[in-house]
Image (cartoon, helix red, strand yellow):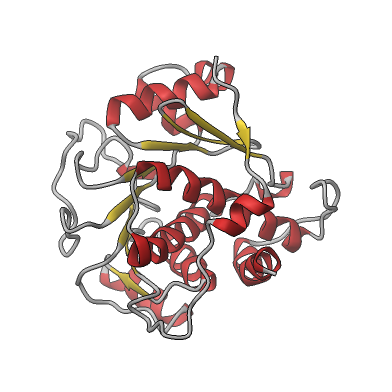
Amino acid sequence: MTTARAWTAADAAAWSTPPREEDDKYARGVLGLATGSVRYPGAAVIGVDAALHVGVGMVRYLGPEPVGRLVLQRRPEAVLDAGRANAWVLGSGTAAEPGQDADVALPDGVSAGDGAAFVIDAGAIGVAPTGLGPTILTPHAGELARLLGVGRERVLADPVGAARTAADAHGAVVLLKGATTHVVHGDRVVAVREATPWLATAGAGDSLAGVLGALVATRAARDGVDLDALVALGATAAFVHGRAARLAAGAAADGSGGGPFTILDLNARLPDALRALLA
């Protein structure tokens, strides 16, 4: 049985990518998001908002026109245009239709095979094409159970084993969200215990996907990323996201106490969480 390695603030700081004096917006990374739907438009707004709070150079949003209008109302610096990206987030705020086949076509404007990395969330898990490039899946326990065709209780009983099974089957990293988030690929298992219980609220996963996508895009623009890097970046995203949630909740250093907050409140504390790490 593999022992999970606890991800620390020092680890997260090492995998954050502060700007250099010579950087421009492209050197800071371009993140594309094909997220949200007319039914769940807020997921797109939350994910774009989170990504921009992490300091990525540019965000492209591809999605239904009415959702794009909401994205621009919240974050007018977002670009509603197709083009190359260093990383893509797919699926937040979408739901796979019953009986939908795997390996469906990518949304229009999403390019694969050009060195981009992929964050596969929510409705794209088990549906997005395989072999896109370095890929990280971000399910919660219920989504992982559906992917594996088992009961949710099986995943909760052995989260690391379930995540490893999915990672091996899909040739990807798996970030299994929960009170303890596990990031798994092969023999590498990282545990992140930074969240507060107040984070159990709608939109948390959409925000995390935006944070992760931004961190991946920025690192990919500078150094490129592979699956090993995605393990570290997934753990760092969970750490930063959890730390921002603690700040938004006013929780103690151990995560106890505090009170409720909205996900946009959490997004607003992401710069503070990163600033403290980099200091």
**Left or right: 85 as drawn, with respect to 70:** left
* Quadrant of image for the C terminus: bottom right
Q: Is residue 4 above or below residue 39?
A: above
Is residue 146 visible in the rendered image? The answer is yes
Q: Quadrant of residue 130?
A: top left
**Left or right: 60 as drawn, with respect to 164:** left
Residue in view at x 46 percent, y 17 percent: 151
Q: Is residue 178 above or below residue 220?
A: above
Depth check: 266 or 112 in front? 112
Residue in view at x 26 percent, y 66 percent: 85
**Residue 175 picture location, percent across and down:** 47, 39
**What is the tally of numbered marks visible in this picture?**
0
Depth check: 263 or 113 in front? 113
Residue in view at x 53 percent, y 56 percent: 15
* Quadrant of image for the N terminus: top right
**Residue 270 picture location, percent across and down:** 62, 66
**Residue 227 picture location, percent across and down:** 36, 42
Q: Is residue 126 above or below residue 84?
A: above
